[in-house]
Structure formats: C-alpha cells, structure tokens
Image (cartoon, grey):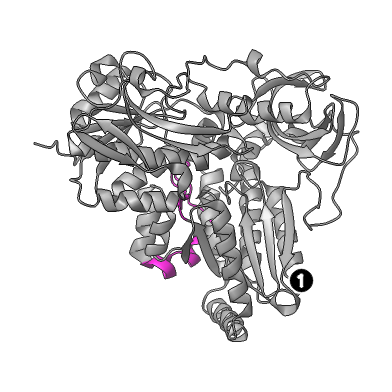
Amino acid sequence: MNSVESGESRVESVNFRAYGAHELLSTLDSRLSTQTPMRILFLTHGYNSLTQRLHCELASRGHEVSIEYDIADSVAEEAVALFRPELILAPYLRRAIPESIWKHHVCLVVHPGIVGDRGPSALDWAIQEGEKDWGVTVLQAEGEMDAGPIWASAEFPMRRARKASLYRFEVTEAACRAVLEAVEKYTAGNFRPRPLAEAGGRGRLRPLMRQADRTINWQRDDTATILKRLDAGDGFPGVADTLFGQPCHLFDAWPEDVLKGQAGEVLARRETALLRATVDGALWIGHVKRPGGIKLPTSLAFADEVKDLPEAALSGWWAEDSATWQDIRYEEAGVNENAVGFLHFEFYNGAMGTRQCQRLREAFLWATTRPTRVIVLMGGADLWSNGIHLNLIEHAASPADESWANINAMDDLAEAILRCDSQLTVAALQGNTGAGGCFLARAADQVWARNGIILNPHYKNMGNLYGSEFWTYLLPPRVGEEGARRIMQRRLPMTAGESVAGGFYDACLAADPAAFRVDLARRAFELATTTDFPIRLAEKKAKRTKDESEKPLAAWRGEELAQMTRNFYGFDPSYHVARWHFVQKSLPSWTPRHLARHRDLDWRQPP
C-alpha cells in the first residue's frame, strides 16, 4: 500500500502494479457502495473506448452521467448550465477546458501520463523512449494545461505494444482505478488534492511529438528502433515516410524473423501487407494513409506498385513458429478426441473486409475437419471484431456494392459457425467488440468475454444501419423481445459483466489478459473432456434441426438483408453519410442525444 497525507485525512492508495485490474475495481466497489450518487458531466473530444468504459463504471455505481462533446466553449457552458453537474470529468480532451467552467466547477482531467508528466503526447513519448513503467494521473483543471493539483494516480509496467493497444488495456484499467479513487475522495468532501509542485514524481513537461521526432532512417535504424516509432504513432497520427517514392503515413507494423534484404527495400507482399527490410531484419507494414486519402491496407493503397512483388504466402493456417505477420492462425492443444483448436484472427482495428471474412470462413471450415471436440474463436488480442470494413467500403468504386458483398461475406461466416455440427464452438472475446462482431460471436455455442472489455451490440449509430449476422435469430431468445429492442435502440455500450447478467453472453472471465487465456484454456478443455460431451453435441444438432424446420436460416438472413438493401441502395443516404464521416474522422458538430441526457426533451433540471 502507498499512503497519501491530505490535510486531516489519510487516504490509502492501492498500487496498480501489485494487483489485477479486477481485484482493484472490486476493492473500490466495496468502498463506493455507500457513496451518494452524483450528477457527473463528461466533457470529451469523442466517445472513445476509455470514455465508454468510464461511463459504464460510473453509471453502474448509480451516478447520473451525461456527456457533451468538446465542440466550442459556448456549447460546453450550455451543457453545464443545463445539467448543473456536481462534478465534471474530462476523460479525453485535445484542448483546455474553458476558464468560465473550471473556475466555478471542479473539473477532473484524465491524463495518460505519470505524476508530473505534462504535454499532449504523453504515451507517444513513453513508448518511443522505452519507458519501463508508466501511468495515469487524474488532476484538476486550472489555467495551465496538465499543471493542476493531483487527485489520484495509478502506474503500470509497460510492454512492447502499439499505442492503441496500451491505451485500450493498461491506460484504461489504470484510468478506471484512478478516476474511481478520485470520485471517492471528492464525495468524502475533506480531501485536498496535492499541488503539482508538491507531488514529486519523475514526470516532466514534454512538447507535442511532431513528425520530425518520429523520423525513420531505414538505412541506419535497427528493427527495434523503427518498431518503437511506429508503435508510438499507431492509431494516430502514424509516421510520415515514403513507399515506392511516394509520401505516406505508416501504421500497423509487425516484425519478421526470417526474410531479409537490403535496408529500406520493399521485399514482398502477403495479403494486405508489405515487407520492408531494416538494417538487421524486416518489418511488415499493414496499413498506410496517402496524402488526401484514408487509411487503407498497404497492398491496396499501392495496388499498382505491388503487382510485381513476390508473394510471401504461408503454407496454411497453422501458426508459424517464427515471428511474422499472420492475420489468421490456428493452434491446437490436447491429444486425440479431447483436443481443442484455437483460431486467431488479428484484423487491424477489428474491421473485417469481404476477403478477410471469406478467408476466415475457409480457415474455420478447415478447422472443423480437425480431430477436435471444441473450436475456440480467439479474434485478436485487443479487438475481437467490429464488423464490416468501412474504410474498404468507402474506397470501393461502388460503396453500396462493396457494402453488400461485405455483409454477405460476414453472413456466410456466421452461417458456417451456426451450422457447425462436428464440434462445440466458443467465441473468446479478449478485446472490445462492436456492431456485427457482437452477433458474429453470438453465432458460437458459447461466448466467454474478458472482464473489462466494452461491447457495442447495435448498428444504429452508423446511419440507422439495420444490421445482419442473424441477430434477429440470435438475440431475442437470449434476452427476450423487449430486451432485444432495448439493446438495439439504446445505442449505448455494455460491459462484459452486463452482457452476462442480461443473458446475451455466457461467461465473464478474468480481467488480466494472461489470466483470461489460462482460464479460457481450462474451460475449453473441461468442455472437451466432459463425460456428457456426446449428449451436448447431439442436443446442439437437434436444436439446429428443429430451428431450421420452423424457420430456415435463409429466411432470417433474407429478412435482414432486405432491410440492409434499403440502407445500401435506398433513398435515405444516412448510412453513406455516417460512414463517410466515420472514415474521414470528421469532427462532431453536436453530441448525439442518447449521450447528452441533459438535452433530452423530457430532461428536468435538478432543484
């Protein structure tokens, strides 16, 4: 334990590094159980994964949360006047809170840096400079950015990972711990936050990281150095570089252990990625963004240039022994009929294009021919699936036609999982999952989710998209007709625990990723070795036969796709407009009404 002396109160602070995230939040749950609920206003640049997680955590503890996007000072001031919050939280901002607000309200800012760290590129610098430990600080907004008094902090060990990956797990878990601790202190009413000058710590003021700080020299820098720079820029803004003599920003890098060549040379292609040599190895570059364009798979963005490159194809679906880029890979554990197959699919940002769906279906059907009892659909380490690939659709000559091809390929995959009668299937959600991915997972016999992930099981935020993946067949039997209507209409995120409590998913497993994988493997082997396995498999076959006789899967699919046809080809362009704004990363012009509760017509100001 660490202790923090604050005036007359002594507040104990649990060290994030000594405990798993689930144990930390459980400890805080017991502390917060007696707290009086508050009105908490989020001021945020967007509704990103961290904002969603904090929204869920605070709402589950009884707090009344409303959200306003940081569009303009006047809009934020109006939100404060309407909601009259007791506390303001800024989980994700790109500019300072206006003085007209922070002078009159306690505003807590979530900064993804250790105590004393200041500046807008905290995590970028930590990754690029090889920090061994990092953290999150919750501080009070004042005149100078990131320089206000400190309410809470949490540290964590760094790992070799991309910025987006660290943000989704370590930063998010630490932020939850620190924010809940800060809220506890605020409701206690007698806590005095530490001024930055008294807080100590090894953090320092660092500037915005610019492209000059990220520059790669392919003829001089080794693989580890280049990978750090690409990891630090992944997600946004990428690393400015050139390919085939053309300027672009690089994203999505994977090391290669075997293939090598002259430093800087583009050596080969594999599916969507290109292999580029370094002075001591090579890196696969999965995605790029060309000037004026959108982020695309590298082999598509440079389609003409890659035609003559050799294809470094893999021999099959089995996981390679050496480090390489392999977006779909299969592993097996156990022996004879008790074996379990693990099918991984690591798709960038969880987006699944037409060919990716087709290839994954091929891999799944191949996996069903293996002498196993259970197939576990692992998804990726950070994201399971977010449904159809909006960037590829936007890039297509006909976005409507590509939308149609993509959703049919998703449905083909979902149907293959639903019709599997040779094994029991498990969807193992290690990371966040959204839209069609949530229902693709539900096509499996069991869905086991890691505690701490965020689910968005709805489609309407994408221009009132109706959705498919057999959700009309899969969802109501699990949650009831009214429950299905509520999930699809409310358009709000759901935690893994909520999904299980509501009957949508089947189990909520350990929060720590390593512990989750151990727990998952144990459960999968128990499923494979249970004495009543033949009965379970027979019951599965019988249910599928019964359901098919009552209403074929083709009928469910046809009804859903009839609605999707209107989205793709109908007179209402809402889906195409929403997709364009999503792909272009347009700044929001307003806060969606399902988030800004204070702007509901039936909202009543508190007395």
Residue at x-position 64% and y-position 71%: 419
Residue 448 visible from this viewpoint = yes
Q: Is residue 597 visible?
A: no
Q: Quadrant of the N terminus?
A: top left
The residue most toward the left is: 607
Please determine whether, in this image, residue 370 is positioned above or below residue 122: below
Give the residue drawn at x 64%, y 41%: 348
The magenta segment: 451-480
Residue 237: image location, x then y, percent:
59, 24
Q: Is residue 423 above or below residue 11?
A: below
Expressed as whole percent of the image width and height from the top left, the position of residue 376 reads: 63, 64
Question: In screen coordinates, is 475 left or right of 66?
Answer: right
How many numbered marks are there? 1
Q: Hey, which quadrant is residue 74 in on the image?
A: top left
Q: For residue 125: magenta?
A: no
Please tell me whether residue 454 belongs to the stretch shown in magenta: yes
Q: Badge 1 is on which residue?
A: 370
Q: Is residue 294 left or right of residue 372?
A: left
**10 Å crowding of disc 1: few (<14), some (14-19), many (20+):** some
The residue shown at (76%, 78%) is 336
Q: Is residue 389 above or below residue 293?
A: below
Q: Quadrant of the C terminus?
A: top left
Q: Amino acid at mark 1?
A: Arg
Q: x and y percent of residue 298 in the render?
A: 74, 33
Q: Nearer the viewer, residue 69 or 338?
A: 338
Instruction: Judge from the rendering whether residue 550 lies leftward or rightward of residue 83; answer left or right.
Output: right
Specify the quadrant of the image occupied by residue 197. Answer: top left
By secondary structure, the bulk of the magenta-drawn segment is best described as loop
Which secondary structure, mark 1?
A: loop
Residue 524 horizontal/vertical position (percent):
60, 69
Left or right: 49 as drawn, with respect to 404: left
Eyeballing the image, is 432 above or below 601? below
